Amino acid sequence: MTRHSFEVTDSELLVDAPIISLRRDTVTMPGGGTAKREIVEHFGAVAVVALDDQNRIAMVEQYRHSVGARLWELPAGILDFAGEEPLTGAERELAEEAGLAADSWSLLTDIVTSPGFCEETVRIFLARDLREVERPEVSEEEADMNFSWVPFHEAVNAVMAGKIANSIALAGIMTAAEVVAGRHETRDIDTPFEFRPRSMPDRRQAQGIVPDMKQIR
């Protein structure tokens, strides 16, 4: 059977905000017509499962206005600097949000968070051989962030009990659980980041909005 090629015949930028954009694509359908698809553009992001030698995981509690609640999450952040490597972003976020650096890094997984309408893809790393470092001056939002060391088995139990709802944290904790249990191995940090978003980063860089691609006028 010949598979249909979904081709974009028209694209309209509806909203251009600092950390997301919204566009509407017209896409060819298998039946011969076209359909409109609204897509949230994103920079992509990284997150870190940081495990210490006592088998504790570094976690942060952060207010998320979209759900009006504080959620337990992994240290994480968007790849908003032009050309930034995912590992570099992960190292920065681990230092900023947890005051930690790691000597051992590997890849747990890449997740597409909401493929029905959003380009956001997150690369989740496993960091071990941790050491404390000085945290940079925190932003206004991070000033309200709570950091905690959580026994890893308690984090797994919290996922299963529905107490950890952030999808990135859930994916990171459960894939790390497979590694900790010896059932699976991590991947190399140089594994291609296949679904890393390009639409908004490429457009912003073409417009000269570098290195910080959030700084639109």
Image: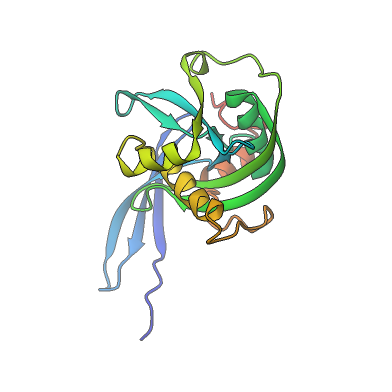
Residues 16 and 104: in front is 104
Q: Tell me which residue sits at (59%, 34%) in the image.
A: 80
Most distant residue in the bottom direction: 1
User: Residue 23 at what x, y percent from top left?
Assistant: 39, 44
Q: Is residue 84 visible?
A: no
Q: Nearer the viewer, residue 18 or 208?
A: 18
In the image, taking residue 33 as reference, residue 8 lies left or right, namely: right
Question: How many numbered dots are placed on residues in this image?
Answer: 0
Q: Nearer the viewer, residue 199 or 138?
A: 138
Q: Position of residue 195 (x, y in %)?
A: 52, 55
Residue 121, relative to residue 135: is it above or below?
below
Task: Please tell me which residue is depicted at 60% across the width and 35% down the height of the picture.
Answer: 54
Q: Position of residue 204 (x, y in %)?
A: 58, 38
Which color scheme did the rendering employ for the protein? Answer: rainbow
Vertical comparison of 92 with 153: above or below: above
Check the picture and name the quadrant holding the N terminus.
bottom left
For the point 37% across and 41% down, the residue is 157
Residue 193 placed where, x, y %? 59, 55
The residue drawn where x is 30% and y is 39% is 162
